[in-house]
Structure formats: C-alpha cells, structure tokens
Amino acid sequence: MRRAGNLSRHRPQDNRFSDSGGFQVRSAKVTVIILALLFTSLGGMAQAKPADDLLTKYREQGAGNVNAKAGETLWGRRFKDPETGEERACTTCHTNDLHATGRHAKTGKPIAPMAASANPKRLTDPKFIEKWFSRNCRWTLGRECTPGEKGSFLLFIQSQ
C-alpha cells in the first residue's frame, strides 16, 4: 500500500531550471562568464584608445599623412648632435627590434620593449607618451618632433 505523502521512493525533482533558485544560480554563472569574455575582448580596445586619442590630437594640430612606414623610417634614421657631432637614432637606446628590451645610452638602464604586444603597459598613458616624445625627440633629433612625426611613430609602434 502506498502512502500519499511518502516521496522518498521517488527520484528527487531536477530543479536546475525551476523557480526554486537553481536556474538563477546557473544564470548568474553564465552572466559572469559573458561579462569576463566581454571585458577581455574590450581590453585591447582600451589599450588602443589613448594612442588613438593622441593621433586625433596630432591630426588636429596639422599632422598630414601619418603612417607606420614613415614612423619606421624615422625610427632607424640617424641624426647628428650639433654640439658633439655624435650620431643618434631611436635604435641607439631602443634597438631595431621593438619587442626587445633596450638600454639607455648614458645610464645603461634597461628600457622595456616598445611594442605593446611585448609590453602591455606601452601606449596606455597619454601623459607618459607625450613626456617621452618630448625628451627623446630633443635628445635624438635635436628638436621637438612635429605632430606628423609623433603620429607616424605611434602608428609604427602600434603595428608591432
């Protein structure tokens, strides 16, 4: 004889998709996974944003046709220091390979790779980028870089 209230012999109900909370837990897990994937995919766009903003600024300042090839040419070009006669290039400290660690010509201190693919912090802070453009352009070229030169350098570095 079967008793009406005895459910112990029956299989427990599968509550994964019921209103009793199981569905909510699974739904929350899916939401967390989707958000994690979204933030991961947006990470590259967030890194590109400061450099893109600077490129817009340089174009507004009159930079004409900026391109990575012009930046690459400038990167390897040698400039003569008018005071010492010493030849300098970006490669003097940063090497030809933007994925490699460079060395400061005077102090010997290591310089993190320029390529964002090798150094995720590269090109993420506009103030830092502008500060180093100012210092390095004056030391290497003997003058400030033009907005076009800065834009071409950024495109070249981004392409690495």
Image: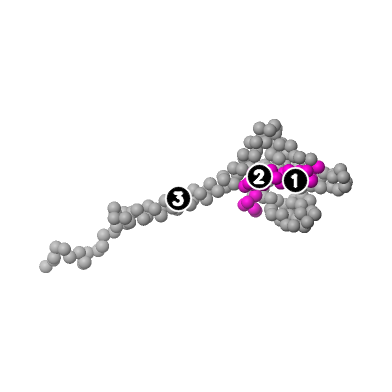
Do callouts 3 and 1 mark residues in contact (Cβ within 8 Å)? no
Q: Nearer the viewer, residue 14 or 125?
A: 125
Q: Image point 71% across, 36% down: which residue?
A: 147
Kindly identify which numbered label has been placed on residue 135: 1
Crowd tier of the residue under label 2, counting other residues whose Cα lies within 10 Å: few below 14, some 14–19, many 20 or above: few
- Above or below 92: residue 68: above
Q: Amino acid at mark 1?
A: Arg
Question: Which label's residue is closer to the chain start, 2 or 3?
Answer: 3
Q: CA distance from mark 1 to mark 2?
A: 12 Å
Q: Which element type, helix, strand or loop, lies under badge 1?
A: helix
Q: Amino acid at mark 3?
A: Ile
Marks 3 and 2: in contact by CB < 8 Å?
Answer: no
- Percent position of residue 122, x then y: 65, 49
Residue 112 sits inside the magenta stretch: no
Side of 142 relative to 22 (left or right): right
Q: Which residue is mark 2?
A: 127
Q: Quadrant of the N terminus?
A: bottom left
- Characterize the local packing of mark 3: few (<14), some (14-19) or many (20 or more) Cα atoms within 10 angstroms: few
Q: Residue at x 33, y 56 (%)?
A: 22
Q: Residue at horizontal 37%, vertical 52%?
A: 27
Q: Label 3's element?
A: helix
Mark 3 sits on what residue? 34
Q: Which residues are magenta?
A: 118-142
Residue 113: x %, y % from top left: 69, 53
